[in-house]
Image: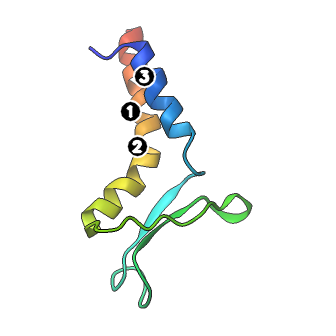
Amino acid sequence: MITEEELQAIETRCNQTQPGPWKAYIEDRDHESGNSFIMTGVGDFRGEDIEPLGATDADFDFIAAAKQDIPRLIAEIRELHRL
């Protein structure tokens, strides 16, 4: 079972990343020119784009989704521990 200390470490790593939400923009799927990238944040809270080298389209989608998924998973685990 994952401990609260481990959850806190995961949460800290997630919170230290650029602002969310993150969205993958894949060349030829989501836009027509330039490289694939992950957009971070929105509006006045935009962060730097992330451009992982050697990543597949699935890698881009997974990395981008993790920014939203990890906090939800942590909350769910904490709720299950509480029960």
Q: Is residue 82 above or below residue 45?
A: above
Which residue occupies the foreground of this view, 73 or 45? Answer: 45
- Kindly indicate whether the residue at mark 3 contacts the one at mark 2 (C-beta within 8 angstroms): no
Q: Earlier in the sequence, mark 3 or mark 1?
A: 3
Identity of the residue drawn at 56% across and 52% down: 20
- Name the disc covering residue 60, or none: none
Residue 73 image position (x, y, % from top left)? 38, 33
The colour scheme of the drawn protein is rainbow
In space, the residues marked 2 and 1 are separated at their CA atoms by: 6 Å
Question: Dot 1 surroundings within 10 Å: few (below 14), some, or many (20 or more)?
Answer: few
Residue 32 image position (x, y, % from top left)? 41, 90
Q: What residue did someone put label 2 on?
A: 69
Residue 47 image position (x, y, % from top left)? 62, 60
In space, the residues marked 3 and 1 are separated at their CA atoms by: 10 Å
Q: What residue did someone put label 1 on?
A: 73
Which residue occupies the foreground of this view, 10 or 70? Answer: 10
